[in-house]
Image: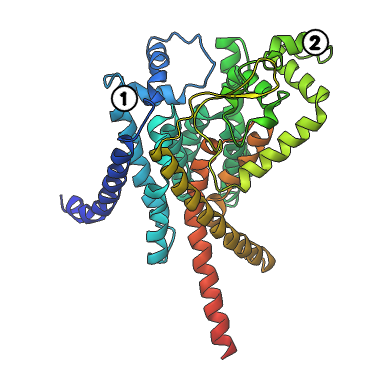
């Protein structure tokens, strides 16, 4: 009883912070012009409960997370706010690694002031689940809890397969930190633990679904990501909406138009490679655009809301419902300011990393692992496509690192001034 009473004052700041974030989300929900898409997982959640595993179009992480809230139909607001509040509390814990109190408060402000993150948490089908698992995975990594990091990292990848790259990398690095505390053979097993998990998932998918694909939607994505007119879509327009008309948007027609790549069984993947081969200049523009869109813009990607479609003759882009409301425009402006500040902070972080590497100073766990998810995200982004919703969670993780770097740079400047005197 005494321990509970002693712990209560420590819990209060976390609860107040989570409540403040929830209030911001509740205010934002009053301006939504689309319903929450998390309800799209309802059928898959029920199929999992009934052990009717026949669909692997998307991985089941979000559907598993929705199961405890299947009673909260039709929009599942309870689930959204539950995982949003938990994410806020976990982010609060991560920000404790920022030792300077003023900088820590500034880092904490990043969660509720990121308008697009809040918007996506309320409207996207799985982003709030992704955010929860990514933050929880990172917290266990920072605390060097290998087993829980492995488990939660698995659920993160089960929600968003793009994280397999960083999951494998972080588990490898985390295991290497313990190599002096256990036998060599045991540590080698630990270093490859994420790979063993990946292989187990691939075997499971082959047995249950007849395919080793992590998600069968990947063939659609890879076609649209390397389709002839992809370079005209992002960063301005939504790729899925624009590439909806015309012969070059039909993978079966593209596959029939030319020969080659018959070794590939999936005609959509064959069509993607044929588009790359037949349109090398467009492919180059698209790939450079992906790098630019991932690292450098202050606007969200896609920049514009609304419906913009390629005409059937593929000679123009049709303007549909634009959704240019004041709430979306102001939210876009606030996010642009947020992202511009983020990029300025990133510049100071790069300087600090350069100085740390030059001085051969060993990076701490927080200094190393907070940046890796964001950096590794360019790999799936380059292979497929880049939108802000695919990187916004990992960008949030870099915020505490920005203020750790800023604090270190400030201390360095102060020490140099003292030495000069």
Give the vertical position of 339 relative to 225 (above or below): below
**Residue corresponding to mark 2:** 257
- Disc 2 crowd, CA 10 A, few/some/many (<14, 14-19, 20+): few
Residue 266: which quarter of the image? Answer: top right
Disc 1: CA contacts within 10 A as few (<14), some (14-19) or many (>=20): some
Residue 224 location, quadrant: top right
Q: Residue at x 84, y 11 (%)?
A: 259
| Whole-percent x, y for residue 159 in the image | 49, 28
Where is residue 163 shown, x and y percent of the image? Answer: 56, 35
Q: Looking at this view, is 341 or 354 the one in front?
A: 341
Q: Is residue 42 above or below residue 238?
A: above
Who is closer to the viewer here, 282 or 7? 282
Which label number is shown at residue 76?
A: 1
> Residue at the spot x=60%, y=64% of the render?
352
Mark 1 secondary-structure assignment = loop
Task: Tell me the residue at 61%/25% (across/down).
Answer: 199
Q: Earlier in the sequence, mark 1 or mark 2?
A: 1
Q: Quadrant of residue 129?
A: top left
Position of residue 116 in the picture relative to residue 222 (left or right): left
- Percent x, y of residue 408: 52, 68
At x 30%, y 46%, the residue is 18
């Amino acid at each position: 009883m005494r321990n509970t009473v002693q712990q209560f004052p420590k819990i209060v700041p976390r609860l107040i912070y989570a409540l403040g974030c929830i209030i911001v989300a509740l205010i934002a929900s009053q301006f939504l012009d689309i319903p929450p898409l998390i309800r799209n997982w309802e059928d898959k959640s029920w199929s999992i409960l009934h052990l009717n595993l026949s669909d692997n179009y998307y991985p089941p992480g979000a559907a598993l997370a929705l199961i405890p809230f299947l009673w909260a139909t039709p929009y599942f607001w309870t689930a959204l706010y539950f995982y949003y509040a938990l994410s806020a509390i976990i982010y609060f814990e991560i920000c404790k690694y920022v030792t300077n109190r003023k900088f820590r408060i500034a880092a904490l402000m990043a969660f509720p002031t990121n308008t697009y993150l809040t918007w996506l948490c309320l409207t996207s089908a799985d982003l709030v689940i992704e955010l929860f698992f990514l933050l929880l995975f990172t917290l266990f990594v920072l605390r060097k809890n290998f087993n829980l990091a492995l488990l939660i990292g698995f659920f993160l990848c089960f929600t968003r397969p793009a994280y397999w790259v960083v999951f494998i990398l972080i588990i490898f690095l985390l295991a290497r930190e313990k190599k002096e505390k256990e036998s060599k053979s045991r540590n080698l097993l630990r270093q490859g633990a994420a790979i063993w998990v990946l292989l187990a998932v691939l075997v499971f998918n082959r047995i249950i679904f007849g395919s080793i694909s992590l998600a069968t939607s990947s063939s659609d994505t890879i076609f649209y990501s390397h389709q002839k007119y992809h370079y005209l879509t992002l960063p301005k327009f939504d790729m899925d909406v624009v590439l909806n008309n015309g012969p070059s948007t039909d993978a079966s027609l593209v596959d029939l138009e030319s020969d080659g790549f018959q070794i590939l069984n999936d005609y959509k993947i064959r069509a993607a490679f044929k588009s790359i081969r037949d349109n090398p200049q467009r492919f180059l523009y698209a790939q450079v655009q992906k790098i630019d869109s991932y690292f450098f813009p202050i606007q969200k990607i896609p920049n514009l809301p609304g419906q913009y479609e390629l005409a059937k003759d593929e000679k123009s882009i049709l303007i549909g419902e634009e959704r240019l409301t004041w709430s979306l425009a102001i939210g876009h402006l606030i996010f642009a300011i947020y992202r511009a500040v983020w990029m300025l902070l990133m510049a100071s972080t790069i300087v600090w990393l350069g100085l740390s590497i030059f001085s051969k100073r060993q990076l701490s766990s927080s200094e190393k692992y907070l940046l890796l998810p964001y950096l590794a995200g360019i790999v799936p982004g380059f292979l497929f496509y880049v939108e802000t919703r695919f990187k916004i969670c990992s960008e949030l993780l870099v915020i505490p690192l920005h203020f750790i770097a800023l604090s270190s740079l400030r201390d360095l400047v102060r020490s140099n001034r003292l030495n000069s005197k």
